[in-house]
Amino acid sequence: MPAAAQHRRTRNSRLVRTLVAAATGAAVLTLPLIGATGASAATGTTTGTTLAGYPNNLDGWIRESLAIMAEKHIPGTYNGIYRNVMRESSGNPAAINLWDSNAAKGIPSKGLLQVIDPTFNAYHVAGTSFDIYDPVANITAACNYAAARYGSIDNVFGAY
């Protein structure tokens, strides 16, 4: 590049670069703290254990459901359940959908895997709660339904 066309830096540019770098560094240090706060809503903080001895959070609910599913020969994996929970409710066991076609019919989708009452009742798994908002009951019933309809929750990649 010819010398006449080269960009000439001003004295302020070093100060600006330093401030931008400092601000970026502060943002990077802050992001994990913000992410950790948001993630606790998805995974739940451990506030004890379930009656079966699993952590009372998303990880424990999925693992407890998988143990029940194994006993009942319902297929599914941790990753398949987790992926669908994150898409459907972001890990909130009290989630309820009040705007879709099911809600318009008076039967809103509820819980971690957004199950409607008739589906929950039809695919309820013995040994779990009859409360659709119970995380383990919701996951297990939804996986039972997905197994009957799609072969496994692992085969579900959208609303089901």
Image: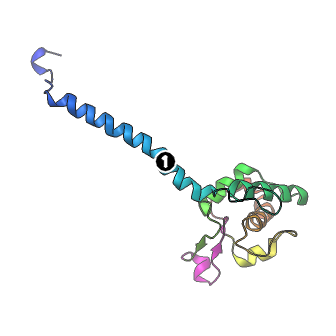
Residue visible at 15% across and 25% down in the picture? 9
Q: Looking at the image, is 100 positioned above or below residue 5?
A: below
Dividing the picture into quadrants, the one containing residue 63 is bottom right
Q: Which residues are magenta?
A: 99-114
Along the horizontal axis of the image, is 6 left or right of 125?
Answer: left
Of 64 and 96, nearer the camera is 64
Binning the other alpha carbons within 10 Å of mark 1 as few (below 14), some (14 to 19) or many (20 upward) gives few
Q: Looking at the image, is 33 positioned above or below residue 160?
A: above
Magenta stretch containing residue 100, yes or no? Answer: yes
Q: Which residue is mark 1?
A: 33
Residue visible at 83% across and 60% down in the picture? 52
Q: Which quadrant holds the N terminus?
A: top left
Q: Residue furthest left?
A: 4
Residue visible at 78% across and 63% down in the picture? 140
Dividing the picture into quadrants, the one containing residue 148 is bottom right
Of 16 and 159, nearer the camera is 16
Q: Position of residue 137 (x, y in %)?
A: 77, 68
Magenta stretch containing residue 134, yes or no? Answer: no
Dividing the picture into quadrants, the one containing residue 89 is bottom right
Main SS of the magenta segment? loop
Q: Position of residue 93 (x, y in %)?
A: 65, 67
Q: Is residue 30 visible?
A: yes
Of 56 and 115, nearer the camera is 56
Q: Residue furthest bottom?
A: 106
Colour convention of the picture: rainbow
